[in-house]
Structures are given as C-alpha cells and as structure tokens.
Image (cartoon, rainbow, N blue to C red):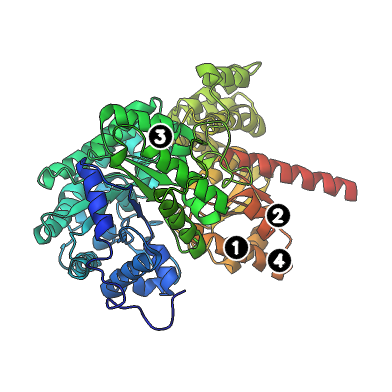
C-alpha cells in the first residue's frame, strides 16, 4: 500500500516517465523494431487495490481512475500505464443494462434477466447517446484526462461484438438462439454494432483521431464458442465495425484465447490476424500448451510483430521461480530470430488479488532479463507434456478440457458404440436424439418409450443420462465445446420434461439434491450452469441459486431443500475469498454439508486450504465427484444401521 500522502504529478512526471515505453511499443507495432522488448499489462483492478480505493469510486470517478493507474504504473516501474476500465459493461449499461457494484472488484453487468430475449425487447431499445448515456461520458473523460496528464494519445477500449451481444442476451441464451433462430441473433448483432458500438467509438475518434483501439472479447474465445460461431458471427462483425469506423487498421480485438483447442492452430492464428492485423497475440494458458518456439516460428514466417501473454494464475499464485522462468522464456524466445525486435510482453490481468510483491517480481524479472541476468537462458519449458508448477492441485488445461486425447480421431464413434452396445432400440434412439441435438424427437421418443411400458428410471439411465455421459466425455477431451454441450442439454431436457410429471407423482427420489451457487461478488455463471446441466442429466435434483449469492442464502436453501451437496463456483480471482467466507459460514453455524468448489481460478490446493469437501476441475469431474459423495454417504448410512 502507498503512503498516506498521495503521490502527485510533482512526484512523477507523467509526461516523461513513460516516454521510453511508449516509444518502444509504438516501434514494435510499426514493425520498425525496438532496442528492448517492452511490456504492457492489464492492471487497473490491481491499481485500485494497490491504492486502497473503493471500486465504486475508482470505476466511476475519472480523476481517481486515471491518477490511480498512472501513479501505480510509475511507482512500480511499468513501461506504460494501463487504462482498462470494466470494458465489458459500458455499451450494455448505456442501453439500459443493470449493473452490480462491489467494494473490492470491478462492477459487472447483471444479465440474469437479459436485456434482449425477444423481437419485442429489441424493438423497444433506444440506441444510447455517446455523450450522455450511463458511463459513456466517464470513458470520454478518462481519455481526455490521460491525454492531458501524459501528452500521449489514449487507447479507445470497447467490448468485442460477440461478448457485447452476450451481455445483452445472456451467454447461454445467445448460443441457443444461434441454433434456433440465427436470423434473430444476426439482427441483435446489427443493432449492437451499427447503432451502439460504431457511434460510440466514432464519437471518441472525433476527439482523438490518432488514438489506438482495443476490443476485449473473452467470450469470443474457444471453447466458449466454436470456430463455426467465430467465422459466422465474431469475425464478420469485427470487420464490419472496423469499416464503420473509417476502415482504421487500429480497430482491433486482440484478446482471444483458445489456441490449444483449435482444429488447426495456424489457421486459428490467421483468424486472429483478421481481428488484430498489426500483431499476433498468443497468451496463456494456451501459449504454454502450444509452445513459444512454434509460436515464434509462425510469426517469423509471416513477418508480423508478436506478443506473448503471461498467465494471470502464475502472476497471482507464483511461486517466484515460476514467474521468473515463465517471463524469461517468453522474452528469450519472443526476441529470437530476424523479427525479434518486434516482440512485446503482456502481463495478463494483474487483479486485486495479485500480491504487489508478485507484480514487483515480474517487473524485476523483465528488467533483469533486459540487463543480461538470464539464469534460464536456452531453456524452454512450454510446449511439452509437463503442466506449469503454477497450476498446482492438478489444474490442467483451462476448464480441465483436453486431457483425454481423441483416440486418433475416433473418440466419438468409440464412445457412442460402447454406450449403445446391448441396449434396446428405443433407448438407442433416445440416446441418438440427444447426441444429434434433436429436441422434438427426444420428447417424442421418450413418450413412445413410456407408452411401450418402459420405466422412467430405465429411460433416464439407458437413454438420457447415457447420452449426457458421452457428451461430458467429449467435452473433457476437447472434441466438443460449450455450444454443443448447451444444445445437447436442451435436447435432454426436452425428454426430461416428459418424464418429470411421472417422476413427481411417483415420488421417485433423485440421485441426490445439489444446491448450486456462484459466490458473492461474482456475476459469472457459465461454468456453474454447465455443472447444473450435467448434474441434472445425471439424475440429480438441482437447486440453482444464481450468481452473487450471499452465504446465508446458501445456508438457508441447503436447510430448506435438505441438500446432499452444496456446490460453489467462482470465475474471478477477486471472488475466491468469498468462497472461503461461505465455507467458513457453514462451519461457524455447525452445518456439516459436503461442499464442493470449482471455477477457472480455483485449484485443488485452494479447495483443501479453505476446507472444502471436494474440488472439480470441470463439469464432468463435478458429476463424478457428486456420485462418489452420494455413494459414500449411502455406505455410511448402511454401516450405521
């Protein structure tokens, strides 16, 4: 934390202290080369915490936001300052989206009730005024203050079109509507890109004609979406937005990940270069999987500037050796070859939970390497079979996907053949209807199976659950992505709805009751919803409490529903402490429910540290874990009797 006396511009001359960094980044992007490899960082939330400023003020007061970022950057020795506000929210908020504000982390759109679900919703929306609506003026003021205080051209930040539409529609509903009614989704894209984003960005270009831009588009990454969605919705709308903004080459969207999930990595990189033509950006965890050498060779072949991004988990969790090893490898390989002078490093998302000492270790590692202190010279750790030490607790690829291999391309055939072996035709047909995403057929086939005298239990186990088991295995192996899971779950639910009245009337018990919630301070629910879907497909009763859930609400519902298991999800590193608080709240009240945890930043080590009963790296593991907990509880009951 800084001293009580605020640092001022007299302490750090913002007009000169970043000159070398700005010049180096500019030369890298221009392709003329830099004398040293510069680094950039996403660190606004880190700056907020470092300065001890409440998020409600930091992300609403332009003076506080700009001064906080500049002061932190100068204090710690960043090459250039970062001004990335909560870019995913601005456009949707300005059109009427509901915001949730927190004290210790960035605000976020709360789209549990989507802004756009129907044609009627879309028709009644009024495009925002770039000069008056919500926090669009905050963005403009931030850019002007930055320019006044540094003398440099600002970077116009915006939400990538696909992620922006997901904010308006809610992610799962957007994906399902892409399958059900693609014309409607294209219409939403037209509204967002043509009537919201282009006017907003162009109004900022009027003030700063020479500004750079950057769009953030995390949801537009594999495996959240498929490459087919990327090709049909994402890339065309980025190109359209660029054209609407004067065909400026600087209009770019650069933060996709998912390289390691692509069918053809180099073709995926070609697509990235359509969205960001000035340089190729490859970031962790994919970079560590794909490998720095392969990435450098591809950028060299094309002669394009290159950026490597260091994992935010590494920067937050360490250890120190891993931070230094990662940075030194990325800088050594990145600066190698004939185009090595057009390389720059990216520190991914220094958050409010990143220890300041880790940020200092990272910066010292960069500056030490530049000065010739290179203890890992010649060593390459990425691109192999060994996981990073920072992914402790069996944390493998992102979302735990892709660890099983594809059985030489025959995984789907092999799994389907095994699942249907020896089954009655009616169950195989139900299974196929889920695997082929045929909702209506699934409902009809389930009804026909009931008419033929099959039991609900057999229809569930032999048809619906068996199909979702296969879907889960394919997802775990990286053979299918989130959209296919959602569409198959919709088919499964169509069949389940036919069974539900009979199951309710017969009082046939579920395999167990699971309370699911995203913890307080976190509005992300994609991972949680996948777990709910897979557990329901496995025969569990799910009570989904939604997002930003108070610990006491979770306890009350666990008591009310006589839950067998409580599941907690977090996507943000900043919300992980609330996961610990929730576990402690159960313990303090003497409530001995098995609590399982998961989410992108969560590891098995963290689960053990906070006293959780179990940890799952992905939705499939969550099903296996819940089945084991129920089986262990049943065994204990029998022993007690």
- Can residue 588 be seen from the camera position used here? yes
How far apart are labels 1 and 4 at the CA level? 13 Å
First of labels 3, 4 by sequence position: 3
| Residue annotated with mark 3 | 259
Position of residue 207 measured from the top left corner of the image (x, y, whole percent): 11, 62
Residue 594's tag is: 2
Earlier in the chain: of badge 3 and badge 1, it is 3
User: Marks 3/4: CA distance?
Assistant: 41 Å
Name the N-terminal-most of marks 1 and 4: 1
- The span from disc 1 to disc 2 (Cα, nearest Å) is 13 Å
* Residue position for label 1: 554
Closer to us: 209 or 474: 209
Location of residue 561 (image quadrant):
bottom right
Q: CA distance from mark 4 to mark 2?
A: 11 Å
Residue in the image at 36% along x and 80% along y = 6
Q: Secondary structure at mark 4?
A: helix
Front of the two marks 1 and 2: 2
Q: Earlier in the sequence, mark 4 or mark 2?
A: 4
**Image location of residue 621, percent across then percent down:** 62, 40
Residue contact at pointers 3 and 1, CB within 8 angstroms: no
Q: Position of residue 580 (x, y in %)?
A: 61, 63
Question: At numbered mark 2, what does the secondary structure look like: helix, strand or loop?
Answer: loop
Query: Tag 3's secondary structure?
Result: helix
Residue that mark 4 sits on: 587
Q: Tell whether label 4 touches label 3 (CB within 8 Å).
A: no
């Amino acid at each position: 934390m800084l001293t009580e006396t605020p640092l001022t511009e007299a302490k750090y001359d913002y007009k000169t202290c970043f000159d070398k960094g700005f010049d180096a980044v500019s030369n890298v992007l221009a392709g003329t080369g830099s004398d040293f490899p510069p680094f950039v960082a996403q660190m606004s939330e880190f700056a907020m915490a470092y300065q001890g400023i409440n998020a409600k003020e930091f992300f609403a007061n332009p003076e506080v936001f700009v001064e906080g970022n500049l002061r932190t950057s100068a204090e710690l020795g960043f090459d250039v300052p970062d001004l990335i506000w909560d870019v995913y929210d601005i456009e949707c908020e300005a059109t009427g989206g509901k915001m949730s504000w927190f004290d210790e982390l960035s605000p976020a759109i709360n789209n549990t009730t989507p802004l756009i679900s129907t044609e009627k919703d879309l028709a009644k929306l009024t495009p925002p005024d770039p000069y008056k609506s919500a926090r669009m003026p905050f963005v403009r003021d931030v850019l002007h203050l930055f320019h006044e205080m540094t003398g440099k051209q600002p970077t116009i930040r915006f939400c990538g079109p696909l992620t922006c539409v997901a904010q308006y529609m809610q992610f799962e509903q957007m994906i399902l509507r892409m399958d059900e009614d693609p014309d409607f989704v294209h219409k939403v894209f037209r509204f967002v890109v043509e009537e919201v984003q282009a006017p907003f960005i162009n109004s900022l270009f009027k003030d700063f004609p020479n500004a750079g831009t950057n769009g953030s588009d995390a949801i537009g990454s594999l495996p959240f979406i498929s490459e087919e969605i990327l090709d049909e919705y994402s890339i065309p709308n980025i190109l359209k937005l660029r054209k609407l903004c004067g065909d400026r080459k600087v209009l770019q969207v650069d933060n996709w990940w998912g390289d390691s999930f692509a069918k053809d990595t180099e073709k995926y990189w070609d697509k990235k270069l359509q969205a960001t033509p000035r340089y190729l950006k490859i970031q962790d965890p994919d970079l560590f999987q794909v490998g720095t050498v392969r990435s450098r060779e591809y950028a060299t072949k094309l002669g394009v500037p290159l950026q490597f991004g260091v994992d935010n988990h590494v920067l937050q969790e360490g250890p120190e050796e891993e931070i230094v090893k990662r940075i030194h490898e990325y800088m050594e390989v990145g600066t190698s070859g004939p185009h090595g002078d057009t390389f720059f490093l990216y520190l991914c998302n220094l958050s409010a939970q990143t220890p300041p000492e880790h940020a200092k270790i990272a910066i010292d590692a960069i500056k030490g390497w530049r000065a010739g202190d290179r203890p890992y010279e010649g060593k390459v750790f990425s691109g192999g079979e060994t996981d990073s030490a920072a992914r402790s607790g069996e944390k493998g690829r992102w979302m735990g996907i892709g660890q099983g291999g594809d059985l030489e391309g025959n995984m789907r055939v092999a799994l389907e053949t095994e699942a249907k072996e020896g089954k009655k035709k009616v169950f195989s047909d139900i299974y196929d209807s889920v695997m082929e995403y045929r909702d209506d057929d699934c409902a009809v086939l389930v009804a026909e199976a009931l008419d033929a005298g099959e039991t609900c239990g057999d229809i569930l186990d032999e048809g619906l659950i068996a199909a979702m088991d296969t879907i889960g295995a394919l997802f775990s192996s990286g053979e299918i992505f989130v959209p296919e899971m959602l569409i198959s779950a919709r088919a499964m639910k169509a069949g389940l709805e036919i069974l539900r009245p009979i199951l309710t009337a017969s009082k046939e018990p579920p395999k167990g009751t699971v309370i699911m919630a995203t913890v307080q301070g976190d509005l992300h629910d994609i991972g949680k919803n996948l777990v709910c879907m897979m557990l329901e497909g496995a025969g569990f009763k799910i009570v989904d409490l939604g997002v930003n859930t108070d610990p006491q609400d979770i306890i009350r519902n666990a008591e009310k529903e006589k839950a067998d298991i409580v599941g907690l999800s977090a996507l943000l590193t900043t919300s992980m402490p609330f996961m610990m608080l929730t576990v402690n709240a159960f313990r303090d009240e003497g409530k001995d429910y098995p609590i399982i945890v998961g989410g992108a930043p969560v590891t098995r080590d963290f689960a053990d540290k906070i006293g959780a009963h179990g940890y799952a790296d992905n939705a499939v593991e969550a099903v296996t874990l819940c089945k084991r907990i129920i089986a262990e509880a049943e065994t204990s009951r029998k022993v007690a009797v």
